[in-house]
Image (spheres, rainbow, N blue to C red):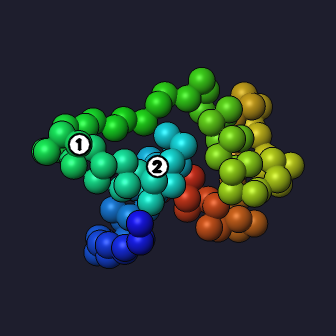
Amino acid sequence: MSIASITVRVDDETKKRFEYICDEIGLTPTAAINTFIRAVLRENGIPISLKKIDPISKNEWMKAALHRKGIPIETVEADEHSNIKIDKEKHPDLHDWVVKG
């Protein structure tokens, strides 16, 4: 079976939010779209509801997300309540990813 490509145009904010949710549920955007396409073909319609899984804790999810992105947890600080803080000046892309999704 040959592989074909589908190109989809979306605004930047939609793309970022989609990637963020895919990351939260443990899928790549490609895997999420392929899952959707297969479900549409199987059901001959739009039958699915994919929702993000609630993490055990915000910090545990964040640690796992940082690990998946290859960012050493040692580079991230925590406040007095052990909430992860991202220094915007040290890690601007990471800060924007965490804050904006």
Compare marks 2 and 1 and give the one earlier in the sequence: 2
Corner quadrant of residue 56: top right
Mark 1 secondary-structure assignment: helix
Q: Going by the image, does 67 lie left or right of 96?
A: right
Q: Which residue is drawn at 41% across and 51% down?
A: 32
Q: Going by the image, does 42 lie left or right of 20?
A: left
Residue pointed to by mark 1: 42
**Nearest the camera: 97 or 19?**
19
Mark 2 secondary-structure assignment: helix
Whole-percent x, y for residue 101 in the image: 48, 54
Q: Which residue lies furthest to the right in this view?
A: 74
Q: Residue at x 71, y 65 (%)?
A: 91
**Residue 99 seen in render:** no
Q: Where residue 30 is drawn, which disc sits there? A: none
**Nearest the camera: 7 or 59?**
7
**Residue 34 seen in render:** yes
**Nearest the camera: 46 or 22?**
46
Marks 2 and 1, how far apart at CA: 22 Å
Badge 1 crowding class, 10 Å Cα cut-off, few under 14, some 14 to 19, many 20 or more, is few
Instruction: Identify residue type, mark 2.
Output: Cys
Badge 2 crowding class, 10 Å Cα cut-off, few under 14, some 14 to 19, many 20 or more, is many
- Answer above or below: position of 10 versus 17: below
Q: Residue furthest top?
A: 56
Q: Where residue 22 is drawn, which disc sits there? A: 2
Q: Which of label 2 and label 1 is nearer to you?
A: 1
Whole-percent x, y for residue 61 in the image: 62, 36
Quarter the N terminus occupies: bottom left
Q: Residue at x 49, y 28 (%)?
A: 54
Whole-percent x, y for residue 95 in the image: 61, 59
- Answer above or below: position of 55 versus 74: above
Q: Residue at x 13, y 45 (%)?
A: 45
Instruction: Identify residue type, mark 1.
Output: Arg
